[in-house]
Amino acid sequence: MAALPVPGQRLQIPADNFTVEALWFPASKYPDGQRPTIILGNGYDGAQEDLYHTFVVPAHARGWNAMTYEGPGHPKVRRDQGLRFIPDWERVVTPIVDYLLINQSAVVDPTRLPLLGYSFGGYQAARAAAFDSRISAILLNGGIWDAYEAFYGALPEGAQILLNSGNETGFNDLIDTFVKNPETPTVIRWGAEQGIWSFTAKNAYDYFQIVKAYRVEEWIDKVQVPTWVADASSEGFFPNQSIRVAEALGDRATYHLFTGPSAYHCQIGSLQDLNRVIFGWLNKVLGS
């Protein structure tokens, strides 16, 4: 951290019954007044350090401060505090906003304080903005309407039948067989193992019951800030969900469909295009 072009700072921010792990990246070694500041949250399995080259470097190139973070379910908090993902994600983001507006008030412009959620973080960012009005705008890459629906849709038909029937033992046995079989698609093997771990589920069946809480329909109308919703024409993890989030938000949403080289989940391999679009939108809605 100290060797970076602009050194970062590792923080532990107290929340209600856990600690948020965060990395603070000021725009400059030499503060010169309030700057726009983007809060960055990763997804289902990503560590916050991954976000440095993904978003922090492009933010610095444009004169922005950046804050990355991890809450319950994210790698460090899951390992060190034993906590799983929580659906009421405002409990994670509100202490971050408190910290930025109080401890970094000299360099953070409170009128330009957007929150970005990457992958599964798209659910988390929307949820936080629904219950913390100090967030200036949100960027959902992508939008998640119903996590259970997406994860259920990735299951083979036989597993879906067992899950629907409530056959917990049969479902768990089948998922265990999939996980142990090297011929099983990685998305199923990894998805099951990572999900059970990051949600501290007892087993695969329990995991699918837990993720039913991660849907936005009941509170999406509370999101009142400008919202950028990314979609990808070859989206593989949350197909057809971003458009539903954007439609529910109406004129508060800007829907952007990535195609061509950028057509894959989270625009992996095309981050220059992603950041060009993101910061262009932020300059338009919050001012450059």
Image: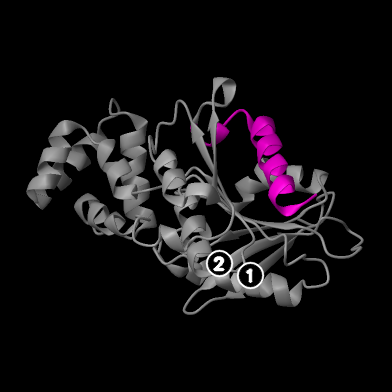
- Is residue 55 shown left or right of residue 223? right
- Is residue 280 shown left or right of residue 71? right
- Report the residue marked by disc 2: 93
Q: Quadrant of residue 27?
A: bottom right
| Residue kind at label 2, given as amino acid type | Val
**239 vs 66: above or below:** above
| Badge 1 element | helix
Residue nearest the viewer, comparing 161 with 263:
263
Q: Residue at x 77, y 66 (%)?
A: 108
Asked if labels 1 and 2 touch by Cβ distance under 8 angstroms, the answer is yes
- Is residue 240 shown left or right of residue 100? left
| Residue kind at label 1, given as amino acid type | Val
Q: Which stretch is magenta? A: 265-288
**172 vs 10: above or below:** above
Tell me where residue 102 appears, x and y as whole percent. 72, 77
Whether 54 is among the magenta residues is no
Q: Residues within 10 Å of mark 1 (few under 14, many from 20)?
A: some
- Total label count? 2
Residue nearest the viewer, comparing 158 with 201:
158
- Report the residue marked by disc 1: 97
Q: Residues within 10 Å of mark 2 (few under 14, many from 20)?
A: many
Residue nearest the viewer, comparing 59 with 187:
59
Tell me where residue 203 appears, x and y as whole percent. 23, 54
Residue nearest the viewer, comparing 37 with 157:
37
Q: Residue at x 67, y 30 (%)?
A: 273
